[in-house]
Amino acid sequence: MSLIVDVVAGGVRGGTSIMYAAAGETVGERAGVINLGTEGSMLVGALAAYMVTVETGSPWIGAFAGATAGAVLSAIHAYLVVWRRANQFASGLAMLFVALGATSMFGAAYVGRPVHGFHIWNVPGLSSIPVLGPILFRHDPLVYLSFATIPALWFLLFRTRIGLLIRTAGERADALLVHGYNVRHVRLLAVTFGGFLAGLGGAHLSIAYANAWFENMVAGRGFIAVALVIFAVWSPWRVMGGAYLFGMALALSSALQARGYAFNQFALDAIPFVLTLVVLAVLGKRTLTSAPAELKRVIENAPARS
């Protein structure tokens, strides 16, 4: 395959975990809650998925366990910020530190243990199509599942009553109160669901992408996901494109190495994070004007209404 096809195909596979996390964060932020602990939800999801897959031999059970672990951590964050009025940024970072400590302690016994995770499944007929085949149809099942996740999430947010409640919680919380809805419950469920998807993203890392567990394996992808939501203007479709863009930045290093190109490895590893900073610097102010009203209040350090 050509370098471009390799990088794009690697971007789809490598960007899937970021896409899941960013999709989940989109739901939470649409409801007016930002979660800097997304990295932590991915981390506990990666470990839980790996542990359960090792013990049961089923990657599907492992993936569900990972998603559940991410949901539990995000639910704690939601409780702290929605019910206890904790600072959203401080609470999210606290959840990250909890995840780092817990996964370091409980994950030590699983470092180096073999796992029977998800394997590449070539879609019959479609995988042999030139260019499109390797890019879209030679992946593991969680990648294929992600292809359906984004349109389903868009439909949920913009074509269902549940989506209307979520968006209203982030735009006009007082309107929900007037109509008898509990804003706290809507936000709790939105953030918990976001953590579920982030945990699934972590599961993809450990039992599909790397098929291994090692300490802090998420390596900043959760923070990239949070940044991605902002400059994707809280749009699921733009989140999908942005996730693949960052996935390609991650895939560039291995693609160049496979072809014998001599580049500084540290410089290549820094590309996704430099790209994040550049895009935020260029689009930061413009995207902030499009933020949900309640989220603007959080960013401007004003108390959110509930």
Image (spheres, grey):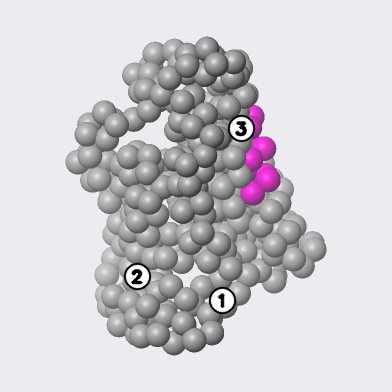
Name the kind of residue labelled 1 in the image: Ile
From the top left corner, tell me how far across and down residue 187 is, in percent. Answer: 56, 27
From the top left corner, tell me how far across and down residue 163 is, in percent. Answer: 51, 36
The residue under label 2 is: 8
Q: Earlier in the sequence, mark 3 or mark 2?
A: 2
Mark 3–mark 2 distance (CA, rounded to whole Å): 34 Å
Vertical comparison of 107 with 58: above or below: above
Q: Residues within 10 Å of mark 3 (few under 14, many from 20)?
A: some
Name the kind of residue labelled 3 in the image: Leu
Q: Secondary structure at mark 2?
A: helix
Mark number, residue 297: none
Judge left or right: residue 207 versus residue 229: right
First to last magenta residue range: 67-76
Vertical comparison of 22 with 111: above or below: above
Relative depth, front residue between 145 and 197: 145
Q: Mark 1 or mark 3: which is in front?
A: 3
Residue most toward the left? 282
Relative depth, front residue between 263 and 171: 171
Looking at the rendering, which quadrant does residue 82 occupy?
top right
Mark number, residue 120: 1
Q: Earlier in the sequence, mark 2 or mark 1?
A: 2
Vertical comparison of 177 with 203: above or below: above
Q: Secondary structure at mark 1?
A: loop
State whether the magenta stretch is mostly helix, strand or loop.
Answer: helix
Q: Residue drawn at (27%, 51%), measured in percent from left and top? A: 275
Mark 2–mark 1 distance (CA, rounded to whole Å): 16 Å
Q: Residue drawn at (34%, 50%), measured in percent from left and top? A: 238
Relative depth, front residue between 154 and 208: 154
The residue under label 3 is: 189
